[in-house]
């Protein structure tokens, strides 16, 4: 989308990840009383950081020493989807469920704060672009 | 992606817990209901299971990343039925009761108020947890709107 750096792509991918994790946590809470239900987990931060770093390292290798590494590849981060899995190796209650509502709600709060941070960063980045395009600060 | 998927998922949780409260209230109201000589109201319970299908709750499917089949589609919880508790009914010695049997015993429901109270606390807590998730979804959607302002 914005070709000069990966910031907007990484932040957008992070928003998808937080949204997916939010849906998974909401599903865990909706099934908090369902017997035998296994909680669902979403992970994406490590994979996303690795994808961004891989692209950066690849560009650095291709460039001569002192030369500008160039623009990131548009697919470096955009194709990355969050990894969704059911955690079926643990048991918390006699009915086979492994949902701890307090833990889910704590993760929900942390996820929400991370989402707020990323939207604020994205907001700032887009404001920068807008001021560059319109010439007004 | 969509924030509205999480709203729908939390809504299924709210509805299931509300139904559970209705059933608990019914059990408590009928704690002494007899239906005839040798028979009485049977305690009811709600059977819940993860919902197998529904509109627009799918998460992005990871390509080439391990995931349990079906784990990428979330649909909240579904009530599969209201089942009767099969545990034996109580027999209470009350020879003057119009529905007492030959030995003077009246068959009373297998409802234990203590169990129902505990279930009520659990259902209330689960309902509140789903409300928390619902509010968090709304807050996240509101924050995301700021990006275009």
Image (tube, coloured by chain):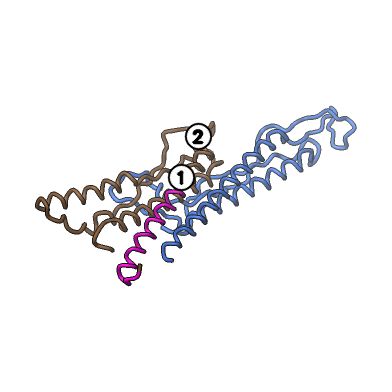
Chain colours: A brown, B blue
| Residue reaching furthest to the right | B96
Comparing B69 with A103, the one in front is: A103
Name the spot of residue A75 as percent of width and height, x first: 24, 57
Per the image, label 1 sits on a secondary structure element best described as: helix
The residue shown at (43%, 66%) is B149
Q: Nearer the viewer, residue B47 or B72?
A: B72
In-image side of A26 versus B116 (left or right): left
Q: Chain of mark 2?
A: A
Q: Is residue B84 left or right of residue A2?
A: right
In the image: residue B14, left or right of residue B67 = right
In the structure shown, which secondary structural element does the residue marked by tag 2 occupy?
Answer: loop
Q: Label 1 lies in what chain? A: A
Count residues near mark 1 (Cα–Cα under 10 Å), then give few for <14, some for 14-19, many for 20+: few
Quarter of the image for the C terminus of chain A: give it: bottom left
Sequence-earlier tag: 2 or 1: 2
Label at residue A96: 2
Residue A123 location, x and y as percent?
A: 39, 60
Horizontal side of residue A88 vs B38, given as left or right: left
Question: Residue lying farthest front?
Answer: A137
Label 1: which residue? A110
What residue is rendered at 65% in x and 38% in y? Answer: B119
Instruction: Give the position of the N terminus of chain A as an image quadrant.
Output: bottom left
Residue in view at x 40 percent, y 49 percent: B72
Q: Tell me: residue A50, above or below residue A90.
A: below
Q: Which residues are magenta?
A: A111-136
Q: Tell me residue A66's x, y (percent).
A: 11, 52
């Amino acid at each position: 989308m914005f070709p000069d750096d990966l910031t907007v792509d990484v932040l957008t991918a992070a928003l998808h990840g937080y949204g997916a994790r939010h849906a998974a946590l909401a599903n865990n809470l909706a099934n908090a009383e369902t017997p035998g239900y296994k909680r669902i987990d979403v992970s994406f931060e490590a994979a996303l950081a690795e994808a961004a770093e891989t692209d950066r390292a690849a560009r650095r290798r291709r460039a001569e020493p002192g030369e500008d590494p160039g623009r990131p590849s548009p697919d470096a981060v955009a194709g990355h989807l969050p990894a969704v899995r059911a955690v079926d190796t643990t048991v918390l209650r006699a009915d086979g469920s492994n949902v701890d509502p307090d833990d889910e709600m704590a993760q929900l709060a942390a996820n929400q704060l991370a989402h707020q941070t990323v939207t604020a960063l994205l907001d700032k980045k887009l404001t920068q672009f807008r001021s560059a395009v319109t010439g007004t600060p | 992606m969509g924030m509205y998927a999480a709203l729908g998922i939390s809504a299924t949780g709210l509805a299931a817990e509300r139904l559970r409260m209705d059933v608990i209230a019914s059990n408590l109201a009928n704690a002494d209901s007899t239906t005839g000589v040798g028979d009485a109201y049977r305690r009811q319970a709600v059977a819940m299971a993860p919902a197998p299908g529904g509109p627009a709750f799918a998460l992005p499917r990871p390509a080439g990343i391990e995931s349990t089949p079906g784990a990428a589609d979330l649909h909240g919880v579904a009530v599969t039925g209201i089942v009767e508790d099969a545990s034996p009914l109580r027999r209470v010695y009350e020879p003057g009761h119009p529905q007492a049997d030959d030995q003077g015993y009246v068959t009373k429901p297998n409802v234990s108020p203590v169990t129902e109270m505990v279930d009520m606390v659990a259902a209330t807590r689960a309902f509140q947890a789903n409300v928390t998730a619902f509010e968090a979804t709304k807050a996240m959607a509101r924050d995301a709107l700021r990006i275009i302002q």
